Image (cartoon, rainbow, N blue to C red):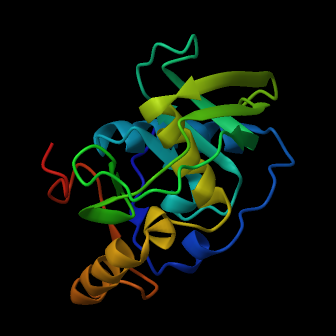
Amino acid sequence: MTVRPIVIHGEPVLHRRAAEVQDFTEELRTLVADMYETMDVANGVGLAAPQVGVGLRLFTFNFPNDDDAPDRGVIINPVLVTSKVPGSAPDPDEEVEGCLSVPGENFPLRRAEWARISGVDENGDPVQFEATDWFARVLQHEYDHLDGKLYVDRLNDRWGRKARKVLKANGWGVPGLSWMPGVDLDPFGH
């Protein structure tokens, strides 16, 4: 297993829809193993393939839950169904989200409180489960990456303005930027 660099907001692969996985090869299984390793070293709860520069529809997750779902896994070519996202403003204390591709930053965002996801694992075997609360948030966040969206793209006007200022101040929004888990300082201070 190899830890891979995590690309930062502005890298084109993060901003376009990822391609369906067609071939379940040893190369795919190596990518999945590398993503687990990268996610773990980065102290992440999820990692989508575009975040390591690979434009394929898959993500890994590691989130202990009470939803009768696996705590850890991979979902390839996922289909996501959610409850309605509340229209009210997010709670700036309870609904703060972060992203390894927007390292060290956090902003409030409303998400659906329930999600059902289905897809396959690295061997092509079916995976399906439901998630609630923060686990549902994790699944929505990672799924968004596969459609070329980052959580900062979903922020309301107030928080979106703040995020744009932070992105600009950090010099992000351009191709070629990344950070290396286990080498670079942990941007979230774990």
Q: Quadrant of residue 146?
A: bottom right
At x 66%, y 46%, the residue is 58
Residue 44 or residue 117, whichever sits in front: 117
Q: Position of residue 188 (x, y in %)?
A: 19, 52
Q: What is the number of callouts on the image?
A: 0
Q: Position of residue 79 (x, y in %)?
A: 77, 42
At x 19%, y 58%, the residue is 187
Residue 149 falls left or right of residue 58: left
Residue 152 falls left or right of residue 57: left
At x 69%, y 31%, the residue is 116
**Residue furthest front in the image:** 88
Q: From the image, which quarter does the C terminus lie in?
A: top left
Q: Position of residue 31 (x, y in %)?
A: 59, 45
**Vertically, is 67 above or below 142?**
above
**Vertically, is 64 above or below 111?**
above
Residue 157 falls left or right of residue 29: left
Residue 125 or residue 147, whichever sits in front: 147
**Vertically, is 67 above or below 153?**
above
Q: Position of residue 160 (x, y in %)?
A: 38, 77
Residue 67 or residue 186, whichever sits in front: 67
At x 44%, y 68%, the residue is 155
